[in-house]
Amino acid sequence: MAQPQQQAHPLEDNSPNAGRAPSVLLWLGAGVGGLMVIASLALWFHYGTQVFFEMIRSGFAACF
């Protein structure tokens, strides 16, 4: 008669830095995104709406 297979238990990482890398990457991504938003708003207020959109359009045109 066939014996039931035992479920393999995943290895647990008990180190002090376990699970820290995803949260660091999340905070780093949020920080970079926040800086991009702040930079965009600063350019918008400094140059005005029309010049801001012209700069964005010319940047896309240069890339493609």
Image (spheres, rainbow, N blue to C red):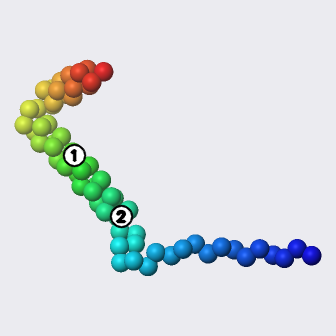
- In the image, which is nearer the foreground, mark 1 or mark 2? 2
The numbered disc on residue 37 is: 1
Query: In the figure, 57 relative to 31: above or below?
Result: above
* Residue 43 located left or right of residue 61: left
Name the residue at 73% across, 76% down. 6
Q: Looking at the picture, tell me which residue is in the foreground, 53 or 35.
A: 35
Relative depth, front residue between 3 and 42: 3
Query: Is residue 17 something one can see in this rendering?
Result: yes
Name the image quarter holding the N terminus. bottom right
Residue placed most toward the observer, 49 or 34: 34
Q: Is residue 53 placed above or below 44 in the rendered structure?
A: above
Q: Categorize mark 1 by other alpha carbons within 10 Å: few (<14), some (14-19), many (20+).
A: few
Q: Tell me the amino acid under the disc marked 1.
A: Val
Q: Earlier in the sequence, mark 1 or mark 2?
A: 2
Q: Secondary structure at mark 2?
A: helix
Whether residue 57 is visible, yes or no, is no
Counting from the top left corner in percent of width and height, residue 52 is at 16, 30
Residue 49, image quadrant: top left
Give the left or right position of residue 49, taking residue 46 as reference. right
Quadrant of image for the C terminus = top left
Look at mark 2 in the image and give the residue it sits on.
21
Q: Find the distance from the CA under tag 1 to the CA under tag 2.
A: 24 Å
Question: Which amino acid type corresponds to the residue marked 2 in the rendered image?
Answer: Ala
Q: Residue at x 84, y 76 (%)?
A: 3
Q: Quadrant of residue 16?
A: bottom left
Q: Provide residue 11's location: percent of width, then percent of height.
A: 54, 74
SS under mark 1? helix
In x, y percent, where is residue 53?
A: 20, 28
Query: Which mark is on residue 7?
Result: none
